[in-house]
């Protein structure tokens, strides 16, 4: 991923000025959270007034925030293709069953080829950025984190709103997602050998598939596996409603390895070597990188939503990916299916809002007085993927609490 500002076994900051939990117990308490947490109120206002939107068409999305070409599809084309064949009078009834499956296989193979091409374009884009700034992709991400930190200090002194970094979020995400290119040689070999049977292999072994080539079924299998690692998160080790400071070195080695495996930052064989050797240094640096990645991505999104003068829009694919990475879902939930309905889409958006409001309230990103490190402490991994409330927002609470305010 990217090289971090070195992780420490302690915090150099004062006691973190932590935000209060967002209460979802009832509508009255949630209304109090809206009053006391200006970030939550600002996000709610942006969403309800249409200044922040979720769109299907990337052409209608904010160009600097999205990279659909590096993300998987949301809906499998089976139903659409089968319906088209059924309604096509030019195809004889006896041919329709075979035609349905043949067209579906052709559509999936075309999707795979498009995904492979897009991975190449993403890699080229990442290399171009590296050439422009004279540094490798992983080091450029580390530089961006430093830029964000210094900008926070400068903006506080000069009382300025956040200004763009050297790259935008779309470019930043492609820097991160370009690592999927390493899967292409094996995937292409499977494509040549198995052709029409490739979708079956990809469903059974989704981890070998480049991220933007995943079908919804394969994505669901991986998302369920990813949800299983939530119990390894640092805040789960604390018996407290609000996480207190934790450095990467305070997290048990088994948890660190499990989290890094879940986020695809180390391979299985490397995990075995690290586990046998007991070497924590490199692993803790990787955990710090992951935490910094989330902080940067949150900064890109929230600073844009809260401070933009016009409409800010992200695609439904970016919404699903943001929720997936932050593990703001329950095992068994189908994120693609949720994002395909208006109610499900609102549920995912509000989960992000609650997460962001807890994490960023009071920071310079949203007009507050503190830098992120001052608010939470240097390299504090305790709040990584913490949902911002005592329990994750569900459809019942969305209807009876959030929608009432």
Image (cartoon, grey):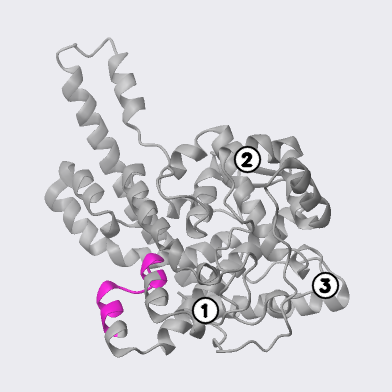
Q: Of helix, strand and loop, which mostly describes the magenta segment?
A: helix
Task: State the CA–CA distance, disc 2 to disc 3.
Answer: 32 Å
Residue bearing mark 2:
397
Q: Give coordinates of residue 127: x percent, y percent.
A: 45, 71
In this rendering, which labeled residue sits more in front, label 2 or label 3? 2
Position in image of residue 10 (x %, y %)? 60, 89
Q: Is residue 75 magenta?
A: no
The mark found on residue 369 in the picture is 3
Residue at (73% x, 79% y) in the render: 374
Q: Are marks 2 and 1 in contact (CB under 8 Å)?
A: no
Q: Which residue is denoted by mark 1 in the rendering?
A: 288
Q: Residue at x 34, y 64 (%)?
A: 181
Secondary structure under tag 2 reads helix
Question: Is there any visible trace of residue 55 in the rendered image?
Answer: no
Up-down relation of residue 275 to residue 124 (above or below): below
Asked whether residue 265 is drawn in magenta, I would say: yes
Would you call the spot at circle 1 few (<14 residues within 10 Å), some (14-19), or many (20 or more)? many
Res 275 seen here = yes
């Amino acid at each position: 991923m990217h090289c971090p500002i070195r992780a420490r076994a302690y915090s150099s900051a004062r006691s973190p000025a932590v935000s209060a939990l967002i209460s979802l117990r009832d509508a009255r308490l949630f209304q109090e959270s809206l009053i006391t947490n200006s970030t939550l109120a600002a996000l709610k206002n942006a969403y309800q007034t249409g200044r922040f939107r979720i769109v299907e068409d990337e052409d209608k999305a904010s160009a600097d925030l999205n990279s659909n070409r590096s993300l998987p599809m949301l809906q499998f084309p089976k139903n659409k293709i089968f319906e088209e064949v059924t309604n096509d009078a030019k195809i004889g009834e006896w041919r329709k069953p075979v035609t349905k499956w043949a067209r579906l296989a052709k559509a999936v193979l075309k999707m795979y080829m498009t995904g492979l091409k897009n991975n190449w374009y993403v890699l080229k884009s990442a290399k171009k950025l590296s050439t422009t700034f004279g540094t490798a992709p992983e080091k450029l991400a580390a530089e961006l984190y430093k830029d964000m930190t210094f900008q926070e200090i400068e903006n506080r002194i000069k009382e300025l709103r956040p200004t763009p970094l050297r790259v935008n979020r779309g470019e930043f995400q492609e820097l991160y997602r370009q690592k999927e290119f390493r899967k292409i040689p094996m995937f292409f070999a499977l494509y040549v050998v198995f052709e029409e049977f490739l979708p079956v292999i990809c469903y059974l072994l989704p981890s070998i598939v480049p991220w933007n080539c995943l079908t919804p079924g394969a994505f669901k299998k991986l998302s369920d596996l990813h949800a299983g690692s939530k119990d390894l998160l640092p805040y789960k080790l604390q018996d407290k409603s609000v996480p207190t400071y934790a450095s990467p070195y305070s997290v048990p080695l088994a948890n660190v390895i499990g989290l890094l495996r879940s986020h695809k930052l180390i391979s299985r064989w490397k995990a075995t070597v690290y586990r046998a050797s007991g070497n924590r240094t490199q692993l803790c640096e990787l955990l710090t990188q992951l935490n910094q990645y989330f902080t940067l991505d949150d900064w890109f999104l929230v600073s844009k939503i809260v401070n933009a003068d016009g409409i800010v829009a992200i695609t439904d694919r970016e919404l699903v990916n943001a929720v997936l990475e932050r593990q703001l879902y329950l095992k068994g939930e189908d994120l693609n299916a949720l994002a395909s309905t208006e109610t499900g889409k609102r549920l995912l958006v509000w989960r992000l809002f609650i997460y962001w409001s807890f994490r960023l309230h009071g920071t310079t990103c949203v007009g507050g007085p503190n830098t992120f490190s001052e608010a939470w402490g240097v390299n504090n991994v305790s709040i990584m993927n913490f949902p911002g409330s005592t329990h994750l927002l569900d459809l019942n609470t969305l209807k009876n609490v959030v929608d009432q305010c």
